[in-house]
Image: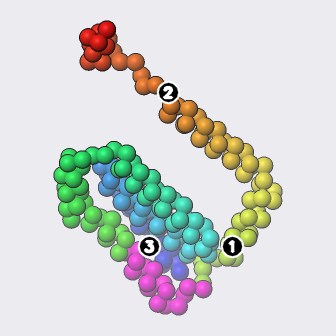
């Protein structure tokens, strides 16, 4: 399991560097998903399958859904189709594909060797243990975090409903308003 831990950690670092250094948001997203899946494998190697499953479901799944919504909201049209053709070149997806292949080989090798019951050290972290810990001594912190997230949601909703910024005096909108008046 140690080799799975170290290889997954290496892939996570390399994929995160791909996220940071890539100027194209779509390419950065591919690296981000690889990074999140490799962090989930690190959790599995450490004996925390619940945390690893949450990593995949919440982070990788939620980010993909968010990305789909952003693409739908942009409504790129014909320019978007041309841009997607440029994104499908092998040069673009080769890096994330190689890192994903390293993760897949690591996972298959770990499962094939029969080490799936072993972990690096410590005891297995179950969902019950997480719930007991979070809603036991850390209940106040969890409730405060929930209130902070609720306040952020209300603020984002309020800011999203505000009218846009005022246009400069020499812009088209001002000229159009003068013509209409």
Quadrant showing the C terminus: top left
User: What's the residue at 63%, 44% (across, down)?
Assistant: 149
Instruction: Identify the residue position indicated by label 3 in the image.
Output: 7
Which one is in front, 5 or 29? 29
Q: Which quarter of the picture shows residue 105? A: bottom left
Instruction: Identify the residue position indicated by label 2 in the image.
Output: 162
User: What's the residue at 54%, 37% (across, down)?
Assistant: 156
Picture layout, residue 98 above or below residue 178 = below
Q: Where residue 102 appears, x then y in whole percent?
A: 37, 75
Between the residue at mark 1 and the residue at mark 2, the CA separation in whole angstroms equals 44 Å
User: What's the residue at 45%, 80% (across, down)?
Assistant: 107
Q: Which mark is residue 126?
A: 1
- CB under 8 Å between callouts 3 and 1? no
Highlighted range, magenta: 102-117
Under tag 3, what secondary structure? helix
Q: Where residue 82 appears, x then y in whole percent?
A: 18, 52
User: What's the residue at 56%, 70% (across, down)?
Assistant: 53
């Amino acid at each position: 399991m140690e080799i799975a831990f170290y290889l997954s950690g290496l892939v996570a670092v390399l994929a995160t560097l791909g996220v940071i250094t890539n100027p194209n948001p779509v390419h950065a997203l591919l690296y981000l998903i690889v990074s999140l899946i490799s962090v989930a494998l690190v959790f599995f190697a450490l004996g925390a399958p619940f945390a690893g499953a949450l990593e995949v479901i919440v982070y990788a799944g939620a980010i993909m859904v968010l990305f789909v919504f952003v693409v739908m909201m942009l409504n790129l049209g014909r320019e978007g189709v041309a841009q997607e053709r440029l994104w499908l070149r092998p040069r673009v997806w080769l890096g994330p594909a190689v890192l994903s292949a390293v993760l897949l080989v690591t996972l298959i090798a770990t499962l094939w060797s029969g080490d799936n019951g072993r972990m690096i050290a410590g005891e297995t972290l179950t969902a019950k243990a997480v719930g007991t810990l979070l809603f036991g001594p850390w209940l106040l912190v969890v409730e405060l975090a929930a209130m902070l997230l609720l306040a952020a949601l209300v603020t984002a909703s309020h800011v999203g409903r505000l009218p846009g910024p005022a246009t400069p005096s020499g812009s088209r909108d001002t000229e159009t308003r003068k013509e209409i008046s």
